Image (tube, rainbow, N blue to C red):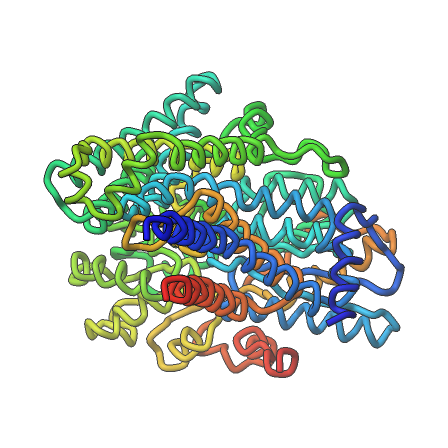
Amino acid sequence: MKTEIPTSSTGHLDRFNLARAVQMLGPFLVLAFVIGFFAVIMPSEISQTFFSAYNFKLILTQTVIVAIGSLGMTMIIVSGGIDLSVGSVVALTSVLGAVLIKAGVSMGAMIVAVLATGGMIGLINGTIISLFRMTPFIVTLGMLGIARGLAKKLADNQTVNLPDIALPSVGMFMADPAPNGYYVAPGIAIAIDLAIIMALVLNRSVFGRYIFAIGSNEATARLCGVRTRLVKLSVYMLSGVFFGLAGLMQFSRLRQGDPSTAVGIELDMIAAVVIGGASLNGGTGSIMGSMIGALTMAVLRSGSTQIDWPNYVQEIIIGVVIILAVGLDKWRQSRSQS
Amino acid sequence: MKPFFLRLVVILGCLICTVPATGAGKNLTIAVIPKGTSHEFWKSIHAGAVKAKRELEDQGYKINLIWKGPIREDDRDQQIAVVENFIARRVDGIVLAPLDSSALVAPVETALSVNIPVVIVDSGLKSDRYSSYIATDNYHGGELGAEHLAKIINGIGKIILVRYQVGSASTEEREAGFMNTMTNKYPRIKILSQNQYAGPTRDSAYKAAQDLLNRYGKDVNGIFAPCEPVTIGVMLALRDMGKAGGIVKLVGFDAGTQSVDGLSKGDVQGLVVQNPMKMGYLGVKAIVDVAQKKKVVKKVDTGVHVITKENMDQMENRELLHPPLDQYLK
């Protein structure tokens, strides 16, 4: 009788690992499906340029802002929260960057200020959510309006344009350094490095495991001695820094401060995180999945533009893919449980 | 399944090689990128582009015309992405109505650096490296609007300027032309409000106009709207308040189905009308000229006119008010 216990427990472990492996692979399957789909339906003269190194770099560049934001959004969603204010924070921080550069502040100081502002807004969100026990949906919905309004105020209700001399250094993060070579824009490298770091933080660090614990069951986590309020506050603040960084990338891409930019970009990030296998109920999700999710949407957008579909087709298809990706995930989960 | 996998392998192989730009003389792929796709103004540009395509095809060219606006209208980042995608696709030319005079400079210069000619239509770009700029003299359009509004309120009274949107170069020039003419030439006309922005859609313009009229409705004699959605928003708000039909004079900009209908019903007292079809038409022609290494004119003015209820049935005005969209877009 005693020998049965280890076999059954290893069996359980194996199944657990299998389920986890499938969950990890899911987003890749969706991405592979999208790429394969375009490969089959594209006429050869379009697929020649679509499947080129240049376009590959381009798609990565177009993913950077959503990808960096998704790093923060993954943490927040895993912890069982949501942040609807990201688009406004991106606009506010990008306008702040432009205003500072215009006022003659150095690039380094501007970057610090932009990241700090993002972190500060996250801190405010996190404080209200954790101390006053208000739902993240409502708090960040309020912040969506506040940050957007502040962005417009700061920009004096117009776009903040820079002197020509400042443009190359501002645009550096998102500019392709060599259109015909293999070097990529610094923004892409930053996003990939941060994704690796955040994947380690979420999976290997105590802080990361606490986030999963809170997302799975906040009451249990608290009873187990996790300082849930502090962890949640840190999650929103750290995410805010990422949203500030996304704002910096937006500023670098537009090379101007635009208070009306990035409306609804948080929805792209939420979609990326969810395609990546997270549940809006919290407790599941992975950085790798979210990155692939963000990439999937960029590939879809780029492919539908280059294949010359009307915009409405593109919008419908992206919607369908989001629902299919999540449906597929649910289906896999229910199968691995039964 | 087998051919599918073969094809996938071949295509993945292509990932490694960058494909050089192609430029076969008479076989051209031209991308036309408007600011948005849902306003009739852009449809007229599209119709003009199709008209050019048909004429060129009669001359033996083969034109693949791609019409593509940004997914989120009025979103600069999305329009940059569209331009970039067509650079990646190595089209033979891009006709672009830039959403922003600064933000679109970088992608346009990237296109030019890989020898894709770019023709700018409708709104200006802060660069001089594009092949040609084909647009309305918007400042003059604003002047004409001010002259007409001043004339129909007999040079005396109170007016409102409802601005369109922050950072839109074409409408800002119209607003500047309007404001300068009003303040310099008509001292007896008082401007009640000139700092409210209507926002990008008819609905946002409708709301802004309702708010303004709620405050100034009793005093105002005339309103100027610098583009189509604002004209319609103001017209709807005037109708709600029972001030339409000439009680408050409305001078708008651009011809759309609703604004032209308003003109014929007497709710709009004048429309400053541009010629968007000509922009699309000349834009595509200019790309072909550049591809043929012909010289193109750097700046082309496509003209503006004031159309009123009285002269709207004249032959040339009728074509401006009712561009033959069905003939080209169906």
Q: Is residue A245 above or below residue B96?
A: above
- Judged left or right of residue B65, residue A279 is left
Picture quadrant where residue B277 is located:
bottom right
Q: Is residue A211 above or below residue B191?
A: above
Q: Residue at x 65, y 53 (%)?
A: B85
Q: Nearer the viewer, residue A39 or B28?
A: A39
Q: Residue at x 42, y 28 (%)?
A: A97
* Residue A334 picture location, percent across and down: 37, 66
Residue that sits furthest to the left in the current view: A132
Q: Is residue B139 visible?
A: no
Number of numbered callouts drawn: 0
Name the image quarter holding the C terminus of chain A.
bottom left
* Residue B249 picture location, percent across and down: 31, 67
- Judged left or right of residue A40, residue A234 is left
* Residue B73 picture location, percent across and down: 47, 58
Residue that sits furthest to the front in the current view: A1
Q: Nearer the viewer, residue A135 or B141?
A: A135
Picture quadrant where residue A94 is located:
top left
Q: Is residue B254 above or below residue B137?
A: below
Q: Is residue B172 visible?
A: yes
Q: Residue at x 72, y 38 (%)?
A: A179
Q: Residue at x 77, y 38 (%)?
A: A180
Q: Nearer the viewer, residue A125 or B152?
A: A125
